[in-house]
Image (cartoon, rainbow, N blue to C red):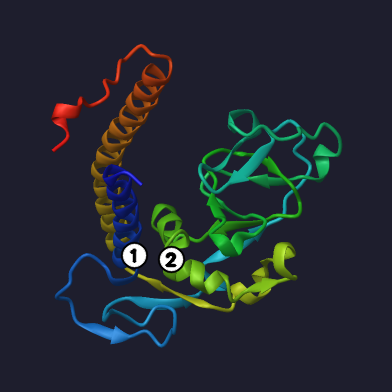
Amino acid sequence: MLPRERERELLESLKQSEIANVVTHGLNPNVPMKDSGIPWIGMIPEHWKTRKIKFLFKERSQKGFPNEPILCATQKYGVIPQNMYENRVVVVNKGLEGLKLVKKGDFVISLRSFQGGIEYAHYQGIISAAYTVLIPSQDVNSQYIKFLFKSAPFIGLLQTCVTGIREGQNINYDVLRKNQIMLPPLDEQQAIVDYIETRLTKIDSYIADLQAEIDYLKEFKQRLVSDVVTGQICVAEPQKGDLR
């Protein structure tokens, strides 16, 4: 592995750990803390509340919107129209009335969501009825929840709320909804979102520069090897007088 590739991996790890830290502990390291009473969270700022998930989200089960665009839930991009997804999936043309409505700002619990697949909806449309669609309450900032749902501590919680065996495991929302999450005041939720987005912009910019350098070095190495193999670069053998 190239040193630059290792550096890129460390930056990715730093990004994830920083997100996890601020969404679960806030921005002020000197604020008084208290035990949340929630094993996967531990200590939280004293002025934060804890609420059961079932009180912060409602399920959306509306159907009968065949003219809405068909959506897909992706771990990389969130919930987006199928025609925007780079890994094109088979488009369903029948039974559109039976698909669930999703509105922008909703969350979709996708298949194998215990791996971190509770996805934020960037668009309105319809999606498979097999997915659970959640409407956040006015007590939560959807952007804050989006980062929380992708944090390592929360993914650890998801892994305790699964049904099925091995490759067939999926999240059981009836189990998940009984669990609690931490809830900062709304203004603090927004401050955390602003901080994360600013930090991510800087880190992602540096990662992009590193990736460009890595790609260049790999291309240069491949070209150099090719030139040597095809004889475009002459590799002289050492002379006897040079061996000492």
Three-letter code for the amino acid on which mark 2 is drawn: Ala
Q: Is residue 196 left or right of residue 60?
A: left
How far from the left and from the top, in percent, is residue 100?
A: 72, 47
Q: Secondary structure at mark 1?
A: helix
Residue 141 visible (yes or no): no
How far from the left and from the top, in percent, is residue 123?
A: 55, 38
> Residue at point 26% right, 81% down?
46
Task: Tell me the number on the disc at residue 157.
Answer: none
Residue 129 vertical placement versus 38 (above, below): above
How far from the left and from the top, in percent, is residue 61?
A: 72, 55
> Residue at point 62% right, 74% down?
161
Within-10-Å neighbours for mark 2: few <14, some 14–19, many 20+: some
Q: Is residue 176 left or right of residue 196?
A: right
> Residue at point 27% right, 62% down?
188
**Quadrant in the picture for the C terminus:** top left
Residue 10 vertical placement versus 20 (above, below): above
Three-letter code for the amino acid on which mark 1 is drawn: Val
> Residue at point 60% right, 73% down?
176
Find disc 1 in the rendering and name its residue. Answer: 23
Residue in the foreground of this view, choosing between 238 and 42: 238
Residue in the foreground of this view, choosing between 191 and 227: 227
Residue 127 visible (yes or no): yes
Find disc 2 in the rendering and name its residue. Answer: 152
Residue pushed farthest top? Answer: 232
Residue in the foreground of this view, choosing between 45 and 165: 165
Dot 2 or dot 1: first in sequence order is 1
Q: CA distance from mark 2 to mark 1?
A: 11 Å
Cβ–Cβ under 8 Å for marks 2 and 1? no
